[in-house]
Amino acid sequence: MSEPLLSIRNMSKIFGGLVAVDDVSLDVRRGEVVGLLGDNGAGKSTLIKCVSGVYQAEEGEIFFDGAPVAFASPMDARRVGIETIYQDLALANNLDVGANIFLGREMKKRHLGGLVQTLDDKLMLKESRQTLDSLQIRFPTLTDPIENLSGGQRQAVAIARAVYWEAKLMIMDEPTNNLGVPEQHKVLELIRTLKDRGVPVILITHILPDAFAVTDRVVVMHRGRKVAEKVTARTNAEELVQYMVGAREDAAA
Amino acid sequence: MRKTSLLAMAAGLVLALASQGAEGAEKLKIGFLPGVVDPFYQVMQLGVEKAAKDLGIDVVTQIPPTWGVEAQTPLLDAMVARGDLNYIITAPTDKDQMVGPLQAAVDHGIKVITVDTFLGDGNYGTGPVKFPLSYIGSDNTEGGRLSARGLAKAIGGKGTVYINSTNPNVSSVEGREKGFKEEMAKDFPNIKVLGPDYNLDDANKATQQTAAVLAREPNLAGVFGTNVFSAQGAGAAVVNAGLGGNVQVVAYDATKQAMELMDKGTVSLVLAQKPFDMGYMAVMFAAADAAGVTSLPRRVETGFAIIDKENVKDPAVARFIYQVPGK
Amino acid sequence: MTERASRLAPSHAAAPPGALTPAQRVTLFLSRIWAWVFLGVMVLFFVVAVPLTTGGSVNFLTVRNSQNILVAIIPVLLLGLGQTFVIIAAGIDLSVGWVMSLASVLSALALRGAFNSGVPLFPSVLVGLAAGVGGAALVGFVNGVIIAKLKVPAFIVTLGTSFIVRGVAYLMSENTTVIGLPADIRAYGNDALIYHIGGEGGGLYFLHRPEVGGELLRRMDIILPYPVIVTGFVVAWAMFLLHRTQFGRHTYAIGGSMDAAVRSGIPVDRHIIELYMLSAATSGVAGFLSTLRYTAGSAVIGDPLLLSSIAAVIIGGVSMFGGAGTVIGTVIGALIIAVLTTGLVMLNVDAFWQFIVVGTVVIVAVLIDQSRDLIMARAGGRVRR
């Protein structure tokens, strides 16, 4: 088995008196989709925020691509290729698709020998269009502000952003919440596309059908601890529910 | 100077009226731009309008909402841009900063008459600023002296007094402060003078400032409010502190509030200026100048009515209280 | 579209969600240009009404009047420019008026000090500029640091600093004014690029006021005074900064979603500090220009201008919630206020009416902004926030 792309070892995150993540270890290999399951408050979001650089864990280590890493900010995580799509998508409603895809990493044109730099909107639009096309996402127009796009379309923009920046690892936090059925299908398809391209995905969800639709493995958390790790094909819904509600717990894997 | 100038003005008036009738000359148009909205300038406006009516002159009036060059200059510029004004009668809100904008008006062919406040040092014959036609206003330095004497008498010749004023660098109140301090220093060495504080034309601030002085000077004997808002505000502070009658207030400008305070015993002396005269004469001067009169005095002092408890009911004096019909 | 994609596409054949109907597009377009239209209508109104009410002796559309208006908008516009950036980023700067006053005092003191120690006139003027804008930027820096690092709301911070700045300006001035400046700086504050004298004996003169008097002087028109040119450059630079650079893009992003900006790696704290420094700096320029115009520093000059600058910004289409607005909009807003004041004087109507009209226009601007919001939300099938 190849070395895991991402390796979390004995991670703990404490907020004041609350232990949000309690000694969790987790591996993600290239090309696999790992589901991170658990009920509300299980610590799933907190765990991945430690991986994506939003939080810094009190204990534990992270290895990425074989080397130990420490992320002081979200930008650090992005730089090594970890892209995260949060529940609220972190998109700017008043900007258009291209501007969002390139937010924080805008392409610039140099003038006057480097003295003056302007935004290269044309190039950014072209690149955005290419990426969206490759993911088979269609938008009516790319230059209107995204605030009037539907939930699924906005998810698509967030995913396209991560894809453009050549994510080596994609983390998605509850991506199908608030989406209509056809759009949920679309998101799951995009996850499959990513997997086909060799980009591993950590998918946080509490919707079991989604987990069964796309994941290779599932990890269940309960009250901050990892209580189960199963190959998806070899488990079922009732079993997972038992882990999720705390009725059952495996020894630390 | 008074007598001869009056004769000159009367002659000028006759000439003006005659020449207008004879040649069928174009009607004169005058702009009136006082300092700010207050009873003093409102009475002045009455004078301006009466003269305009008597002499058949059109007047364009604009009153700045607040005291300051930023409020007065755009109105002045717009008046000049009209292109149809022959004269502008104005109370410049700063004796240095308004020189430029008013000079621009003069360059454009508009003659300027200043009322109540002056530019430069007020001496348009030999001073640094020479372009205005005339300055018509109170001799504020003398007014300051009169106020000092009145307050000194009211407090018995000794004690601590406090000046509350409006804006610095304005010729009118500056003159009053100067005259007041000079007189105290000269004739009443036992009186200590505090201030002035500047309330920037805000009666509320005048009240706060006076209240603060009252609080830290328990033996304060008198207050001199140098104009409308200062007097009202300072008087209010004295009343609020329950010291009406014990702390003597001398007020410049005979507003209704000042007179009410005099009724209550808070204000012992009111110096009434003659804004109606200023406004009326300014228009007359413009008419005379337009008719060709060249011996208009460059400076006219319009005098005071000194109002105290004794003569406040005398109609000859009471007519100088600033009243605007319907207000 | 591939077969798989078409199977998953929404079943209704209507316009895909996110597109706008033609009717909605037209309404949105109108809502964006209404301020321009209003300005045009107002100008037309005055052009017609002024000669009518004065029997033809006064005209609205004269060279002199147009230049007056350009000069009149300078303080409100410069204050509004900085305010535009700050409000687009969902902040607000209540200290701009007092910063302008402080800058006026600082530049006057520095100019006078330099000149009196023997520095020639033009370099003294530059010293004054540096002192005014530099001092202002320092205040902006303090504002920005407290807002970004200590997370105190901008409304409160800038209100607080405005009081401090006011006190400092009073104390540093000599009873609120600073006089005694060399008289020649009046040329910097009032001279123009072009002078035109019409009619006989006239001509075109450039750069300096021609030494003429009497009738020629009376007929002289002053075109493009230097302060207007300086302001023009500041406006052009602000437009470039806001619409063509990464700085501007990030400003919009921070206003649209602070979260998105932070998580996209935008250095938000530093950007916020820069925004408040920018806002203070434009106010500093305004203070410096007023010192040149009146050849005196004044600690009270910016006092009434704060609310007008915010009104100009709102009329120009900047949303108070952040994320939207343009520089040109603020220019239009400032023009509307100045044209209104001038027109009322020319109609010989009490200039106090301008307050009623401006207030009404501000409310209309906000209503239009909100209805835009409604249309955009309906198009996306979302419920309005």
Image (cartoon, coloured by chain):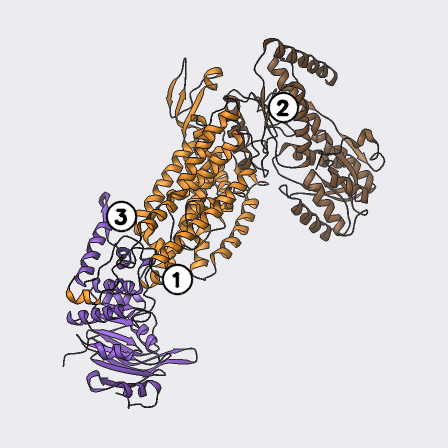
Give the chain ID for the purple colour.
A
Q: Residues within 10 Å of mark 1 (few under 14, many from 20)?
A: few
Alpha carbon separation for disc pair 1 and 2: 71 Å
Question: Which color is chain C depicted in?
Answer: orange
Residue for badge 2 = B123
Give the mark toward the camera: 1 or 3: 1
Which amino acid lies under the numbered mark 2 shown in the image of this protein? Asn
The front one of C119 and C53 is C53
Residue for badge 3 = A118
Q: Are marks 1 and 3 in contact (CB under 8 Å)?
A: no
Which amino acid lies under the numbered mark 1 shown in the image of this protein? Val
Helix, strand or loop at disc 2? loop
Where residue B154 appears, x then y in whole percent?
Answer: 82, 40
Residue for badge 1 = C383
Helix, strand or loop at disc 3? strand
Give the mark toward the camera: 3 or 2: 3
